[in-house]
Image (tube, rainbow, N blue to C red):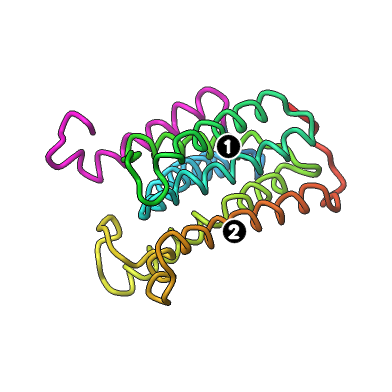
Amino acid sequence: DDKYKTQGLPPRAKLAAQFLSAGIASAAGLELRVFDTLWLDLPLTCLWVVGITNAINLLDNMDGLSAGATAIAAVSFFTIAAMNGQILVGSLAIALAGACLGFLRYNFNPATVFMGDTGTLFMGFLLAVIGMKLKATGPAWWSFIVAIAVLALPIFDTSLVTAYRIWKRQAVSQGGKDHTSHRLVKLGLPKSQAVLVLYGASAVAGAVALAMARGANPGGVDDGAE
């Protein structure tokens, strides 16, 4: 993408690269095991990786929003992983959180450094992988639900924007001022406060996910830690 600085890679080329990355991750054993059936879990894995990767990219629509939300989600993943003895998963999550917080010093409003597609797509891919490897108490599908809860903010924002643009018959890949952050600004909040409100929403989502991970054991099965 950096090679073609005038226009960047076309959306289809980026999407193809993301599906390729998802396929490589799956071939390396990084895949969801929600249904315990390859022909269902493999498409779900690709959808998850590509979806979360793009969700974090789309969330980068206001200074500090994507980096801060990623840091909060990564801390939530770290807490759940540490609680379940997942040292490697927790280490990756807290390293991602630290990198985002260090970057956020220069990326929060008014930003002097920007992440661009290269940074946000990489962050999204890492969050997707961490979410796939997360083990909460209970069956595999419950761990997946917990990961969805952690990433509720980017998932909600992307779903909202996608549905709105389809309804308006606009290209989904087209940029716009229809994200959750923009809607908060239209309600009268300054941009920095809108970002802080969404930080709060991400933190609440993480707290809910933590409660889910510590709560009842659905299905009565413990997958153990990795």
User: Is residue 219 toward the left or the right of residue 160 in the image?
Assistant: right
User: Which numbered marker is on residue 38?
Assistant: 1
In the image, 60 versus 168, the foreground residue is 60
Tell me whether circle 1 and circle 2 mark residues in contact (CB < 8 Å): no
Q: Quadrant of the N terminus?
A: top left
Q: Quadrant of residue 163?
A: bottom left
The residue shown at (45%, 51%) is: 65
Q: Amino acid at mark 2?
A: Gly
User: Is residue 25 toward the left or the right of residue 208 in the image?
Assistant: left
The residue shown at (59%, 40%) is: 74
User: Which numbered marker is on residue 138?
Assistant: none
Few, some or many C-alpha atoms within 10 Å of disc 2 (few <14, some 14-19, many ≥20)?
some
Label 1 vs label 2, nearer the camera = 2
**Residue 71, image x and y in percent?**
55, 41
Residue pushed farthest bottom? 187
Q: Amino acid at mark 1?
A: Leu
The residue shown at (51%, 30%) is: 26
Marks 1/2: CA distance?
Answer: 37 Å
**Residue 160, image x and y in percent?**
44, 66
Q: Is 95 in the magenta?
A: no
Q: Read off the residue under disc 2.
A: 200
Task: Magenta stretch: give its range.
Answer: 1-30
